[in-house]
Amino acid sequence: MIWYDAEFIEGVKFYNKPGAKKHLRVYGSVFFPLQEPVRAAKGDRVELQLKATLVDDDYVWNWNTHITDGKGREKARFEQSTFYSQRIPLAELKKNDLAYVPEINSEGAIDKFIIASMNGTETIQEMAKTVITKFPDAFKDVRDAAARVSRLAKKYSK
């Protein structure tokens, strides 16, 4: 289990250790198991290389572990990754194929409509009212629609 503790100045700290109070936690904890159990003895050395690679909106974690005994003899070596545990549906994999012919889904149609409405003549609120009228089942209320419009405006407007 890996977590992070930081104290910047006396009394100003944050951490995410197991059991920490929610208001002090900033990031989640992560568990990096070994592929198989290794009996540890006094004098053994454990070296860990940890790497996080941002892929889209999530991280792929890699952890390489090398365990030696007190005389430097190798007891175990593991190269592991969260990538190996991901289940990627075949339909998602096919979307990476250069021969795949994409067709816009309902979420894409909403975003396309909102982006096309960004013509410099309407406010976020006006656009939200229009989008909720066009896609009434997609939003709880005008505030919900305005949040979507605002998110896209942050990304695609000048």
Image: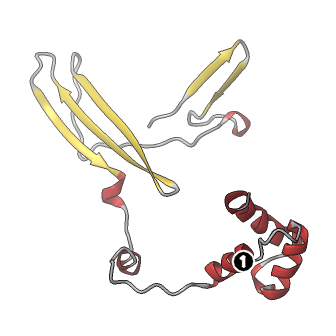
User: Looking at the figure, which quarter contains the C terminus?
Assistant: bottom right
The answer to which of 132 and 47 lies nearer the viewer is 132
Q: In the image, is residue 105 above or below residue 6?
A: below
Q: Is residue 91 left or right of residue 76?
A: right
Kindly identify the residue that appears in the image at 71 percent across and 12 percent down. 10
Q: Is residue 110 left or right of residue 95?
A: right
**Residue 25 locus on image (x, y percent):** 65, 36
Q: In the image, is residue 19 above or below residue 147?
A: above
Q: Amino acid at mark 1?
A: Ala
**Residue 72 locus on image (x, y percent):** 12, 19
* Among the 4 quarters of the image, the one containing residue 145: bottom right
Kindly identify the residue that appears in the image at 40 percent across and 77 percent down. 95
Q: Is residue 65 left or right of residue 14?
A: left
Kindly identify the residue that appears in the image at 71 percent across and 73 percent down. 115
User: Looking at the figure, which quarter contains the N terminus?
Assistant: top left
Q: Can residue 141 be seen in the rendering of this structure?
A: no
Q: Can residue 42 be seen in the rendering of this structure?
A: yes
> Where does label 1 land, which residue?
116
Kindly identify the residue that appears in the image at 61 percent across and 36 percent down. 19
**Residue 44 locus on image (x, y percent):** 21, 21
Q: In the image, is residue 93 above or below residue 62?
A: below
Callout 1 crowding tier (Cα within 10 Å): few <14, some 14–19, many ≥20: few
